[in-house]
Image (tube, rainbow, N blue to C red):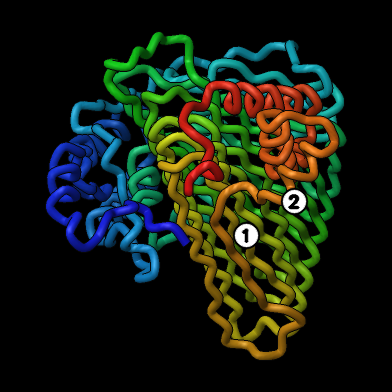
Amino acid sequence: MSSPEGAPAGSAGAAATTASSARHARRTPTDLTLTFVDEPNVRALSEVAGEPGWLLADRLAGLAAFESLPIETNQLYTTYIDLRNAHLADVRPIPAAGRPARDCDELPEGAAALGQIDEDGVCTIAISDEARAAGLVLEPLSRTRDRDPELLRSLVEGGSALPGNDKLAQMTRALWSDGILLRVPDGVRVERPVVLRWTVGRPGTALLARTIVSVGDDAEVSVVEEQLAGPAEAGPDSPQAFYAGTTEIKVGQDSVLSFAGLQDLALNQIAFQHRSAVVAKASTVRWALAQLGCRVVRSRIDNRLEGDGSTVEQAEIVFGSTDQLFDLTSYTRHLGRDTTGNLLSKGALADKSRAYLKGLITIDKPAHGTDSFLGEFGMLLSRQARSVAIPSLEIDQPDCRRAAHSSSVGPIDESQLFYLQSRGLDAEEARKFIVLGYLEPVVARVPLESARNHLRELLESKWRSRTGRPAESVA
């Protein structure tokens, strides 16, 4: 396992001290001086939006949790909090614009519905006639608040599915300015995917938003979420942009939700992401997530398998270059009987990029017959790249079908290179095919063909743009 800092030891200590003094000091989220996270801003946001009292109270509860919680509750992970590349003291939140979303009929090919969101809020909603007739709802949360305030209350009060012990998730609960609701009624199976497209990254701004997904009983839907750089030009000296977003999912009995996420935001972007799913009896949630952009990404996924026979399948990939940092954490809690979890995280790290892959599977006492696996793997493509993998288990119920984890970090396998070169490929082509094949498990799970092809193009582009010597050339 590689050290996250790669610090030299022994007689090189003085040199290490000199080098570290030239770098930014290690920084945790509490050192980011997010000065807008305070009660006056929470109250002002709620007043401008004309929100009911219960929603203001919920925001204030989120703020109180943010102020009281530590940045990391898991002692295994505190060493690896490192946000030195995040400079957010001067970012300012974007107020709720109050702009009405434009309803239109322009859908991506093969999609059942489209929601487009930028820094000024939800700008476009399009739903096919078939999906609308089936009762599918896709709308801004501001519209839900005006149309059915009790529905919104049932979906967001108390933090919905958000982890109550996560400081940054509670920050978003307190200060979200807009978001989107996807609701699939009981008995509805949507054959084509729903596309949620975010375009963000305006320099010097902070956007906090929530995505709520509610799937009824005996229902099925797939979602493709694209997080792309906005049209604003962001040069190397541009102020950073901040995005804090949540995805809060509740799935009813005998239902299936497939969620594919593609993140390719600009390198001036700092992103804190929280995705959570509560899964009922005999239901399945499938995650397929790709992290490519941003200067710093701090991501957390929470899965609660509450119903008997519930399942989560999760695959997340990272392709890092330059000095990007990816801090990815996954928590899966087995509560029902005969639940299943298959979780996989993979990172390909070039140049001076770093990835921390952390995961915890918890098997509670009622969870007889659990089958759960967690794998975390890092591939180093340069001498300066670093990765840490920390899979872990917490088992209170010994009656398990399987409870296992696995991890590794290292360069490309020399035997794989030799095999491909013996078949006529040069070394560069061989490395590319190995890396792209290593990341393919997520690409293949994206349910929309155009998004799948776009992801493959982005991975190819990322491969071409990397710099630095291959890790396998190191003596």
- In this rendering, the count of numbered labels is 2
Q: Name the N-terminal-most of marks 2 and 1.
A: 2
Residue 74 drawn above or below residue 238: below
Q: Nearer the viewer, residue 222 or 19?
A: 19
Residue 203 drawn above or below residue 312: above
Amino acid carrying mark 2 in the image: Gly
**Left or right relative to 348: residue 216:** right
Q: Image quarter for residue 11?
A: bottom left
Q: In this figure, which residue is indicated by the disc labeled 1?
A: 278
Q: CA distance from mark 2 to mark 1?
A: 12 Å
Instruction: Tell me, yes or no, if residue 58 can be seen here.
Output: no
Amino acid carrying mark 1 in the image: Val
Please rate how many residues cluster around mark 2, counting C-alpha atoms within 10 Å: few if below 14, some from 14 to 19, many from 20: many
**Left or right relative to 219: residue 173:** left
Image x and y of residue 68, in percent:
24, 61
Image x and y of residue 236, in percent:
32, 16
Q: Residue at x 75, y 17 (%)?
A: 108
Image x and y of residue 90, in percent:
19, 27
Q: Nearer the viewer, residue 62 or 116?
A: 116
Q: Secondary structure at mark 1?
A: strand
Residue 365 drawn above or below residue 76: below
Instruction: Verify CB contact (< 8 Å) between mark 2 and mark 1.
Output: no
Image x and y of residue 99, in percent:
46, 15
**Left or right relative to 213: residue 450:** right
Q: In this figure, which residue is indicated by the disc labeled 2?
A: 216
Q: Residue at x 41, y 61 (%)?
A: 164
Please rate how many residues cluster around mark 1, counting C-alpha atoms within 10 Å: few if below 14, some from 14 to 19, many from 20: many
Q: Secondary structure at mark 2?
A: loop
Q: Residue at x 51, y 16 (%)?
A: 100
Instruction: Tell me, yes or no, if residue 472 can be seen here.
Output: yes
